[in-house]
């Protein structure tokens, strides 16, 4: 099967790294992660889109990586597009996730340019969702809150 690229997207929720506003530190992490994965960088762009939204983009000869960082929401949207049939965006994604330390991630991996069976029109999608820390006794907490309000 001929595949032109691998495309990984990930939503990183409730990131625990308190350095979400340190864009230079995040750029250094991204540069190191790319080097660790033997990915050459043509150019890196950093843009503050608004007070709470920063964008980092690394342009590669064989793809790109983007990070949209929302510090107030403790949320990062990650996009890795690698134009190689044997690319492993999961390895790069893991390093980035380890830096941001999210409670929950939602990852989707697409095989782009799949020229396999011509009759196959649906894309092959692999989606993984990492569990959020379990919330214990949510119902009991709601009942206690409501009971307190009724007693006031």
Image: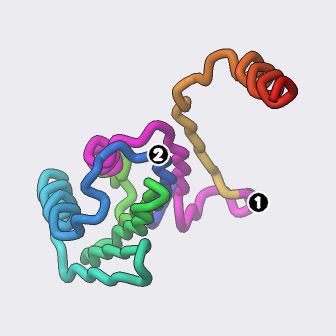
**One can see residue 106 in this view:** yes
Q: How far across and how far down the image is residue 32, in percent?
A: 13, 57
Q: Which residue is mark 2?
A: 14
Query: Which type of secondary structure does the marked residue at label 2 adopt?
Result: strand
| Residue 15 horizontal side relative to residue 134, left or right | left
The Cα atoms of the two marked residues, 2 and 1, are separated by 41 Å
Residue placed at 77% from the left, 24% from the top? 148
- Pointer 2: residues within 10 angstroms few (<14), some, or many (20+)? some
Q: Tell me where the magenta segment starts and ends, as one range.
A: 93-122
Residue 116, percent from left and from top = 60, 57
In the depicted view, which residue is nearer to us: 5 or 1?
5
Label 1: which secondary element: loop
Give the camera-side residue of 41 and 87: 41
Residue 119 numbered mark, or none: 1
Eyeballing the image, is 7 above or below 18? below
Which x, y percent locates residue 138? 70, 22
Name the residue at 28% across, 41% down: 98
Side of 140 relative to 90 (left or right): right
**Does residue 146 sit above or below 123 in this rendering?**
above
Name which residue lies at 18% across and 57% down.
29
Q: Nearer the viewer, residue 148 or 105?
A: 148
Using residue 12 as the reference point, say whether residue 16 is left or right of it.
Answer: left
């Amino acid at each position: 099967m001929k595949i032109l690229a691998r495309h990984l997207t990930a939503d990183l929720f409730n990131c625990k790294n308190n350095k979400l506003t340190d864009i230079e530190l995040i750029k250094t992490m991204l540069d190191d992660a790319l080097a660790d994965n033997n990915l050459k960088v043509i150019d890196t762009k950093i843009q503050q889109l608004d007070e709470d939204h920063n964008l980092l983009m690394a342009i590669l000869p064989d793809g790109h990586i983007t990070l949209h960082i929302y510090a107030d929401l403790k949320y990062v949207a990650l996009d890795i597009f690698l134009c190689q049939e044997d690319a492993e965006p999961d390895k790069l994604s893991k390093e980035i996730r380890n830096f941001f330390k999210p409670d929950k991630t939602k990852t989707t991996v697409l095989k782009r340019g799949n020229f396999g069976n011509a009759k196959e029109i649906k894309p092959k999608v692999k989606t993984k969702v990492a569990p959020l820390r379990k919330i214990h006794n949510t119902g009991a907490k709601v009942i206690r809150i409501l009971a307190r309000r009724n007693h006031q």
